[in-house]
Amino acid sequence: MNKFKFMISAVLVLGLASLHSAAQASGIGFINYKKVQENYSYAQDAIKQVDAKALELQQYLVDKEKEFKALDTPVKKKNFEEKTAKDFKDKQDVYLKLKTEKEEIVYGKIQDVAKQILIDQQLDAIVDFRIIFVGGVDITDLVIQKLNSK
């Protein structure tokens, strides 16, 4: 009999806890991150900066290829190749650092707004839209709106 009372009490406590959490949360939100990136003005500016740096790298290689063709001795060509390879590696490292930095900043800003919406909308979680088959709350446009209004 004591086990039965204990089980009933446990079920009631679990039931009340689930009612309490259900009253506080509205479900699962989902976000189309790619769409947010495409429509977020800061992200577009960051992409343009990264693309410009990539074009600089490409132009650097084109210029160096022209210089290489103008060299006349194998020794000069070998020295030129070594120096150019080192310079290109340095420029590539700067490019990759810029790209990573910009991606982290954009991700952080999007995540901060998504967290704010999670709290405002009283959602349990926000997941990528590709995970949701049916249901959920699409917060993509709300995130874009808040990001661009800042």
Image (spheres, rainbow, N blue to C red):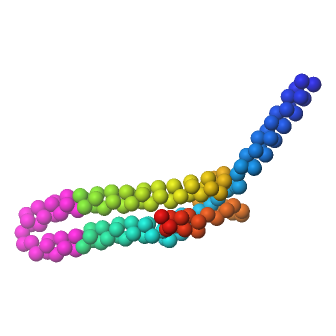
Q: Is residue 68 magenta-colored? A: yes
Q: Quadrant of residue 56?
A: bottom left
- Closer to the camera, 62 or 124? 124
| Magenta stretch: helix, strand or loop mostly | helix
The image shows residue 146, relative to residue 20, as above or below, that is below
Q: Nearer the viewer, residue 127 or 74?
A: 127
| x, y percent for residue 145 | 55, 68
Question: In the displayed image of the protein, which residue is found farthest to the right?
Answer: 1
In front of the other: 22 or 3 = 22
Q: Position of residue 112 (x, y in %)?
A: 51, 55
Image quadrant for the N terminus? top right
Q: Residue at x 88, y 26 (%)?
A: 3
Judged from this view, the residue extending furthest toward the front is 150
Membership of 13 in magenta stretch: no
Q: Residue at x 56, y 57 (%)?
A: 114
- Give the magenta range: 60-88
Residue visible at 70% across and 51% down in the picture: 25
Give the residue at x 73% y 46%. 21
- Residues 45 and 73: in front is 45
Q: Is residue 90 visible?
A: yes
Q: Quadrant of residue 80?
A: bottom left
In the rendered view, would you say 112 is above or below 32?
A: above
* Residue 97 horizontal/vertical position (percent): 33, 57
Expressed as whole percent of the image width and height from the top left, the position of residue 93 reads 28, 57
As drawn, 11 above or below 103: above
